[in-house]
Image (tube, rainbow, N blue to C red):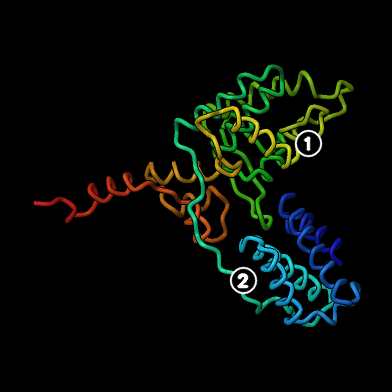
């Protein structure tokens, strides 16, 4: 059942490789817990709310972060929802189990100077892979793509002349996303290298159907590899020290908001189904908030 569910997430729900892999680990942990409890792994009838609560209690005893505990619970809810859909369960025993509360923190984002330093870092890597790395960093920041969305791109999804690309995001939601001149230039340079080094020579291929970002062997670059690429340049760039690969997406949203873009537009660009998700991305420093307040509020100016 777990293998079928993970395949369903990947193929039907279009979940990222990162999410599928994490859910797989979480569900394997639950399966081990059931085995240790003397349950039959193939029998879903003995799974009830008490068993799920006991599993969450064990996670808490192991001192796992609350966010990690919440992800385990989310994986279970998804599995049982799928089992109900397939007629294997009558109800979802994890649905009413409360998610551990997580303290909300502002995500790490990069300032414009830090972004510039990070985007220039691939210049030190010679050969076509340096051009590839520059293109993927530029595109991540210019468009706010998720890493999973980036690696799924084919050349047919990108209109370099119009500077727009087609993205299929979470839940198979399709959107059109613009990007700017630096990203276009980096993509064109990478495309030249791509055609010279990686395009098959037998004349049977259709380049529009080919992945945009490739590994050194000519296969589609994986999300894990992209994260390693970003981590590499973060380590090499003192100004961007400590930044997470998702920081480029956070920075994209924050810089748009700081420049006057409204939340609804940013929501569309990020591909969020809910505005509340977009709001969690926002990070405006106190100085910027004071500037906006003093400029905009009629009673901000003192006597």
| 57 relative position to 118: left or right | right
Q: From the image, state whether disc 1 or disc 2 is nearer to you.
A: 2
Image location of residue 28, percent across then percent down: 82, 62
Q: State the residue at coordinates (47%, 56%).
A: 279
Q: Is residue 156 above or below residue 11?
A: above
Residue extending farthest to the left is 303
The quarter holding residue 217 reads top right
User: Pointer 2: what residue?
Assistant: 99
- What number is the disc on residue 220? 1
- The alpha-carbon separation of the residues under discs 1 and 2 comes to 36 Å
- Indicate the quadrant where residue 212 lies: top right
Label 1 sits on a secondary structure element that is loop
Question: Which one is nearer the viewer's eye here, 258 or 22?
Answer: 22
Label 1 Cα crowd, 10 Å radius (few <14 / some 14-19 / many 20+): some
Q: Badge 2, how many Cα within 10 Å: few under 14, some, many 20+?
A: some
Is 28 drawn above or below residue 184 in the view shown? below
Residue 118 rendering spot, x and y as whole percentages = 55, 29
Q: Dividing the picture into quarters, in which one does residue 37 lie? A: bottom right
Q: Is residue 197 left or right of residue 294?
A: right
Residue 20 falls left or right of residue 246: right
């Amino acid at each position: 059942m777990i293998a079928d569910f993970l395949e369903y997430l990947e193929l039907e729900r279009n979940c990222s490789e990162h999410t599928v892999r994490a859910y797989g680990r979480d569900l394997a942990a639950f399966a081990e817990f059931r085995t240790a409890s003397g349950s039959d792994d193939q029998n879903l009838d003995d799974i009830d709310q008490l068993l799920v609560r006991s599993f969450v209690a064990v996670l808490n005893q192991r001192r796992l972060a609350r966010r990690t505990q919440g992800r385990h619970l989310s994986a279970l809810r998804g599995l049982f929802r799928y089992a109900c859909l397939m007629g294997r369960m009558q109800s979802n025993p994890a649905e009413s189990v409360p998610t551990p509360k997580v303290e909300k923190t502002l995500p790490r984002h990069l300032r414009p100077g830090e972004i510039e330093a990070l985007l220039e870092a691939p210049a030190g890597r010679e050969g076509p892979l340096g051009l590839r790395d520059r293109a993927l960093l530029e595109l991540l920041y210019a468009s706010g793509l998720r890493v999973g969305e980036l690696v799924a791109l084919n050349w047919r999804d990108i209109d370099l002349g119009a500077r727009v690309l087609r993205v299929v995001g979470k839940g198979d939601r399709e959107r059109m996303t613009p990007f700017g001149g630096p990203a276009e230039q980096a993509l064109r340079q990478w495309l030249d290298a791509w055609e010279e080094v990686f395009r098959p020579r037998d004349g049977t291929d259709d380049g529009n159907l080919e992945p945009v970002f490739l590994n050194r062997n000519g296969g589609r670059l994986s999300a894990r590899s992209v994260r390693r690429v970003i981590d590499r340049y973060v380590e090499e760039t003192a100004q961007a020290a400590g930044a997470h690969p998702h920081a480029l997406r956070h920075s994209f949203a924050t810089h748009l908001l700081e420049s006057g873009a409204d939340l609804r537009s940013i929501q569309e660009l990020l591909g969020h189904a809910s505005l509340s998700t977009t709001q969690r991305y926002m990070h405006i420093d106190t100085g910027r908030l004071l500037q906006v307040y003093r400029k905009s509020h009629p009673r901000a100016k003192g006597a």
